[in-house]
Structure formats: C-alpha cells, structure tokens
Image: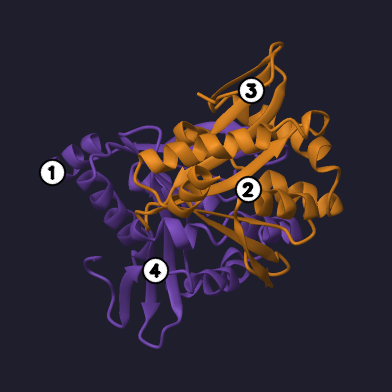
Chain colours: A purple, B orange
Amino acid sequence: MIDELPAGLTARHMAPDDHPRVLEVLDAWWGGLKGEAGSMERALLLPRLYFQHFTTTSYLIERDGGEIAAFLVAFLSQTEPEVAYVHFAGVDPALRGQGLGRALYRAFFALARSRGRRHVHCVTSPQNTASRDFHTRLGFTASAVRADYDGPGLDRVAFSIDLVADDAGARAS
Amino acid sequence: MIDELPAGLTARHMAPDDHPRVLEVLDAWWGGLKGEAGSMERALLLPRLYFQHFTTTSYLIERDGGEIAAFLVAFLSQTEPEVAYVHFAGVDPALRGQGLGRALYRAFFALARSRGRRHVHCVTSPQNTASRDFHTRLGFTASAVRADYDGPGLDRVAFSIDLVADDAGARAS
C-alpha cells in the first residue's frame, strides 16, 4: 500500500475504531500549537465521519505494537472531478525526518491519479511553519495567508499541486 | 430542485461564496446553544471544504432578497456505497414550521436514491432537542446518547433512515 516504509512500520486504510486513537495523539504531536483553542480546533476538524465515510482514501501507519506513527485523512472532491483533498495529516514527532509524511502523500497522490484526479488541495494554519515547509518541499504551491478562510479567526494558507506537472518533474529529475 | 417551497423562497446548490454567509447565521439560528464553546464548535464543523467539494449534494434556500433561509450540507459516503450523510442543516427560526427542513431532507433523500444510496446517516448533540424531534418526525431511528462520539466531551445521538423502507411507508400512507 505504501512503498519503502522504515522497518517496523505498516500502513493500512482507516477504520472507525481509529477515530479516538488519532484524536488522542493530536495534542502531543502538535505540541499544544495555539493552546486550548488549538486543541479543540484540531478535535473538531476530525469528527468521526471522516473515519466512517472517507476511509478508503485515508491512511494510517502503525508501529509493530499497534501504536500510531502517522496518518492522513483525505477524500476525492464530489464537486470537482479533477480534484482530491488532504484534510488532515500528522507524523509522530519522534519519527520525523524518515519520510513518513512524504510516503503518505505519495500514496494518496497515486490513488488520486488512479481515480482521474489531477490536482490535490489542502490548507494549513499560518502558524504551522513545519507544515508550510513540508508542503512546499513536496511541490505544493502556497497561497498568501487568507484571513478568516475557514471562519472568523481561522486564517489559512491554501496549497495546491498539479499531479501531472509533478509527475513530469519526477520523470525528468 | 426542491418542490413546494413557500412563496418568496428559492433553492439552489451551495457555492464557495456561501461559506461565510452560512457561518454568519449559525449563532443567531442556534440561539447560543452550549455558549461560546458551542459557537466555536459549529464554525469548526463547517470548514470551507464543504462549500468547495460537496456542493452538488448540499443546498441553500434563500429569500427573494438573497437572505439565507435554510441550508443543508451533505455528501455521499466514499466508503459505504449505499450510504449518504447529512453533516449540518439549519432553518431560520423565523421560518420554522413551514416545512423547509423537511423539504431539504426530502430533496437530499431523492438525490441520494438517484445515486444508489439506501441509508442516510447523521448525528446531533444530545442537548439539541429540536433536532432530535425533527429527525424522529422525519422517520429517522435514533441511537442512545453516545458519549465522546466525536471526541472528548462531544457526545452525539446518531440517526439513520432506510430510504427503501421509508419510500414504502410513504406509498402505503
């Protein structure tokens, strides 16, 4: 399902029972970014519905013992037939720098391509510089900060990648 | 698109520009249910992505002047091919009792049926007795209160309706 994972890690699609387990790691992994409001913001951005109705486009990477190592929650746009969307993704800070985030995104890119999707979109908080750097390194183009993008006080940077151009770039390199 | 609306009201599918307009009415329409936390909870349950990627299964009813009268945000499950999901719906309190909520759900039921969906699911807060009564009247079956269903402190009642059985009941009545 996901190529070239470090030893001791396996990937699978999400299931409903993963919902509370993923919520449990959010605060630790995000390091309390934006305080209590940030904590509630992250939980409310991941209601159970994503773990029920978008499981086949979402991934979980676990350690051999079952501990969550990384996840990606994503879906195919039902409005735009060429667009797929990454809603939320995270990697255990203890495992960063090993390519897990990149592997998750690459797996979703391949799945999106196989379903006829050319563009992948996502957003992040302007404060989340690690996320902004990560998406830029992956080849996403970033927007300027868009104030109140997701609601009052919920500013976002929007990212987009063209999978056809990205694929051409990969072949040429 | 929606049959038998009262005079002066028209329905259409959602568009991205509707996102801030819908967020603006939430507090007034929900009457401050659950206080400030409830206000943030409602805004975070409606990030812009629903108004970008699930527009063709979501509806807005407006007055002739363009003021929002009611809305329904819904999608087709990408995991379960027979399931559709209503994520969020609201009716201007000044217009309640005129069948707008029922009309929105009926429109979505018809669309879901046309896309091969047999079951429609949704959830609501246990405190929202008006919503619980509404869904029961529409023919939904309610679960017991499920603690922490959507995350810590986010209890929910889950609703489900079988569109085939519901249709049979409608024909028999």
Which residue does the numbered mark 2 point to in the structure image? B138
Front position in the image: A150 or B17: B17
Q: Is residue B131 left or right of residue A25?
A: right
On whether disc 1 and disc 2 are found on a single subunit, the reply is no
Which residue does the numbered mark 4 point to in the structure image? A60
Measured in 3D between alpha carbons, the distance from the residue under mark 3 to the one under mark 2, in whole angstroms, is: 17 Å
What kind of residue is marked 4? Leu
Residues at marks 3 and 2 touching, judged by CB atoms closer than 8 Å: no
**Identity of the residue drawn at 23% across and 39% down:** A116
Front position in the image: B30 or A33: B30
Residue A113 point in image, percent of width and height = 23, 44
Q: Earlier in the sequence, mark 3 or mark 2?
A: 3
| Label placed on residue B147 | none
Q: Chain of mark 1?
A: A
What kind of residue is marked 3? Leu
Mark 4 or 2: the one toward you:
2
Toward the bottom, the furthest residue is A65
Label 4 packing within 10 angstroms: few (<14), some (14-19), many (20+): many
